[in-house]
């Protein structure tokens, strides 16, 4: 966050993210071909659990009433007809961004993948920069690599909110650690619009603010 240009380690991390993403999606495609899931898109292999709810929200938006007879563009039908009023539990930022992309692509499934994929490219470099504030570059690099290869990290590459949330949360912490509190608050607010976990940042950033305040000489205590 303190600079825009990527150094060599950060460039490698972005490349590793892309390689892992390609390997994961290619593996899913092979599973699709091998088992013939009946879907009409290889990406549909990853459209499971909460993911279909986001597709319904991208197409139909948040609704107080859903009679189960909604039909969207390209004859898209709700995965769970009648359930849209229940989707208030899904926070809106990921939905809003995917809806904007869908306006151009006219494919809700691809749109959520685009949003999560773009966000995922920020995760490892931001974690690297954050860890570098306290550790040597090689330690920071390994931390970022381990985050990418952790088994559950596949959520960073599919139509879920994890990559967007992590990018925003890491950005908020990095901004706070580099004394840019307006940016930290803005990114923290966006993370809270992505997942309920973002509300925890209020306490976490508050602790960081108090810590920094008391570490400064009394005459220099201020936040930017």
Image (tube, helix red, strand yellow):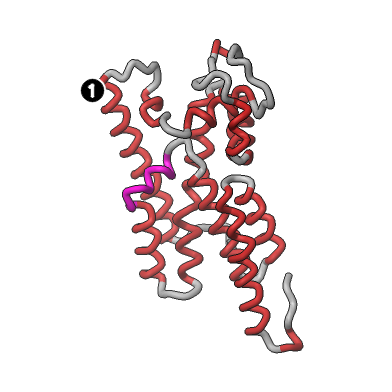
151 in magenta: yes
Q: What is the count of numbered marks?
A: 1
Categorize mark 1 by other alpha carbons within 10 Å: few (<14), some (14-19), many (20+).
few
* Residue in the foreground of this view, choosing between 215 and 102: 215
Q: Residue at x 31, y 39 (%)?
A: 23
Q: Residue at x 31, y 27 (%)?
A: 29
Image height of 69 relative to 209, above or below: above
Task: Depth check: give the residue in front, 201 or 144.
Answer: 201
Q: Which residue is mark 1?
A: 34
Relative to 38, residue 119 above or below: below
Q: Position of residue 27 (x, y in %)?
A: 28, 33
Q: Quadrant of the C terminus?
A: bottom right
12 sits left or right of 170 in the view: left
Res 209 → quadrant: bottom right
Split into 4 quadrants, where in the image is the N terminus? bottom right
In the rendered image, residue 61, in percent from the top left (x then y), is placed at 64, 27
Q: Quadrant of residue 87?
A: top right
Highlighted range, magenta: 149-157
Position of 152 with respect to 163 (left or right) is left
Q: Quadrant of residue 181?
A: bottom right
Q: Residue at x 41, y 30 (%)?
A: 48
Q: Is residue 72 visible?
A: no
Q: Position of residue 194 (x, y in %)?
A: 59, 45
Query: Which secondary structure type mostly characterizes the magenta part of the structure?
Result: helix
Between residue 172 and residue 21, name the one nearer to us.
172
């Amino acid at each position: 966050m303190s600079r825009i240009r990527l150094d060599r380690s950060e460039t490698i991390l972005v490349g590793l993210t892309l390689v892992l993403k390609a390997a994961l999606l290619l593996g899913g495609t092979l599973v699709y071909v091998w088992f013939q899931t009946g879907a009409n898109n290889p990406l549909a292999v990853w459209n499971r659990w909460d993911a279909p709810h986001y597709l319904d929200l991208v197409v139909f938006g948040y609704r107080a009433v859903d009679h189960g007879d909604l039909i969207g563009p390209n004859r898209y039908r709700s995965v769970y007809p009648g359930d849209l009023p229940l989707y208030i539990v899904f926070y809106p930022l990921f939905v809003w961004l995917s809806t904007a992309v869908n306006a151009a692509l006219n494919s809700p499934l691809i749109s959520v993948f685009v949003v999560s994929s773009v966000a995922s490219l920020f995760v490892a470099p931001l974690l690297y920069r954050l860890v570098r504030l306290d550790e040597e570059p090689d330690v920071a690099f390994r931390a970022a690599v381990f985050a990418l290869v952790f088994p559950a990290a596949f959520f960073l590459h599919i139509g879920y909110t994890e990559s967007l949330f992590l990018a925003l949360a890491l950005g908020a912490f990095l901004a706070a650690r580099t004394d840019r509190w307006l940016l930290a608050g803005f990114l923290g607010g966006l993370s809270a619009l992505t997942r309920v976990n973002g509300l925890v940042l209020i306490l976490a950033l508050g602790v960081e603010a108090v810590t920094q305040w008391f570490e400064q000489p009394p005459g220099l205590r201020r936040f930017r």
